[in-house]
Amino acid sequence: MSALRLVINALGFQAAWLCGVGGAAAGRPWLGPAAALALVGWHALTATRPARELTGLLSVAALGTAWDSVSAAAGLIEYRGGAIVASAAPYWIAALWLAFATTLNVSLDWLRGRHALGALLGAVAGPFCYLAADTLGALRLVAMPGALLAQAAAWAVLLPLTVALAARFDGVATARPHAAVPTCV
């Protein structure tokens, strides 16, 4: 995989995250989905098997959106704008999960088979992103520090699980030796 693709993927996700969180905080929740769709479009155009890769992206986005909807329904998170159904994750969060899914077979593919490292990274980075979104005003973490602890526990499971799920539907790889790592998904 080329270094340029890795850089575009990582920066593209960061841009989509900033558009999603910044847009929600500014009362423009449609900005995140617009950026995410652009990233997903580019990702699909450059995939070797786009249909397979898109299946993986949608699977990861569904899983992540379900978790964030559970968090909202449980009263751990209050989202700002974009909710289609009360007490569920808003559409801009679903778009962020879709954008995040593009990283799993590109800039985060080094996590394949490294479940403990993925769990540790998830337990630290996941809550940090929610805390950053809270600070920027896109959401509110309720009942701190319990909300952060719940995110840490969930992301310790979600990151390795989404890496495995993406690997199962990898439509980006041409011939990586670690692409055949067995998964539990």
Image (cartoon, rainbow, N blue to C red):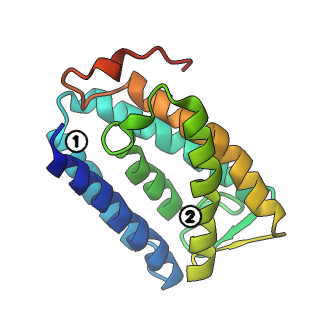
Read off the residue under disc 2: 129
The amino acid pointed to by label 2 is: Cys
Question: On screen, 114 above or below 43?
Answer: above
Q: Residue furthest bottom?
A: 26
Question: On screen, 64 above or below 111?
Answer: below
CA gap between label 2 and label 1 equals 25 Å
SS for tag 1? helix
The residue sitting at 40% across, 67% down in the picture is 32
Q: Position of residue 35 (x, y in %)?
A: 31, 65
Question: On screen, 96 above or below 183?
Answer: below
The residue sitting at 69% across, 63% down in the picture is 86
The number of numbered badges drawn on the structure is 2
Q: Would you identify the image quadrant in which residue 143 lies?
A: bottom right
Q: In terms of sequence position, does the residue under pointer 2 or pointer 1 come before the other?
A: 1
The residue sitting at 49% across, 27% down in the picture is 164
Give me the disc on residue 44: 1
One can see residue 9 in this view: yes
Front-lying residue, 33 or 121: 121
The residue sitting at 56% across, 64% down in the picture is 129
